Image (tube, grey):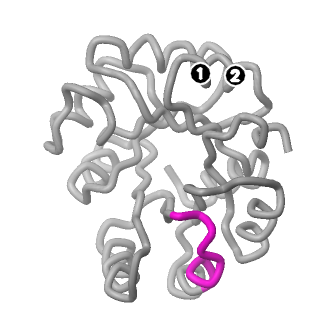
Amino acid sequence: MKDNEIREIFLDSPIIAAIKDDQLLEKAILSDCDVVFILYGTICNIDKIVEKVKASRKIAIVHVDLIQGLNNRDVGVDFIKEHTTADGIISTKQNLVRRAKELNMIAGERSFVVDSMALATIKNHINTLQPDFLEIMPGLVTKIISQINSITRVPVVAGGLICDKSDIMAALNAGAQAISTTKSELWEL
């Protein structure tokens, strides 16, 4: 996916429904969110979960690290590509992000910013992998969002510990292009 395409998607719909169970899946389908991060499932049902998201005309991005039965090898991304209609993946694993890009899928990297070494690692990953977007966690690290935006043009998604509208606005004002949250009451903001 081209950088400007994912930016446009996030600009049009900056709140991402992150779903971790069937109850949130049903809420996401009814929400105004255009993008859904799928954070649960197994190799036996991920196709059906993705199908429900796609049937509601939303972009489905599967967090491959969290799908039971998949491992951290490239074949996990191949499985998602061949057996689902997912638009892309998100992962903490560099090789899976790289494989998704090879398969022309949306390729997002999820990174946890815990210290300055993690920030340096993120910079290296962005330069070598060039993911379509970077989800940094926790999403409340507004100073880090600004720093990351100063070193890359990759769209930043803030996720984790987003509790209310003020958290969303703080992250967006710091330069995040989108917010992912499992709090369904925030999906309609």
125 or 187, which lies in front? 187
Mark 1 residue type? Leu
| 148 sits left or right of 114 in the view | right
Point out residue 13 in the picture as x, y percentages from the top left corner. Answer: 75, 45
Is 67 one of the magenta-colored residues?
A: no
Q: Position of residue 52 (x, y in %)?
A: 56, 13
Q: Compared to 155, does 47 lie above or below?
A: above
Residue 83 appears left or right of 63: left
Q: What residue type is labelled 2?
A: Lys
Rendering quarter of residue 144 = bottom right
Quadrant in the rendering for residue 42:
top left
Q: Residue visible at 85% across and 45% down?
A: 189
Rendered view: 130 above or below 45: below
User: Is the Cβ of the residue at disc 1 closer than 8 Å to that at disc 2?
Assistant: yes
Residue 167 lies left or right of residue 39; in this view the side is right
Residue that label 1 marks: 25
Q: Which of 134 and 168 is in front in this view?
A: 168
Tell me the residue at 40%/64% (across/down). Answer: 111
The magenta segment is: 138-146
Which one is nearer the viewer's eye here, 185 or 83? 185
Judging by the rendered image, the residue that carries numbered circle 2 is 27
Q: Tell me where residue 89 appears, x and y as whole percent.
A: 40, 41
Task: Return the residue found at the far right.
Answer: 189
Q: Residue at x 31, y 30 (%)?
A: 67
- SS class, disc 2: helix
Residue 128, x across and y down, in percent: 29, 73
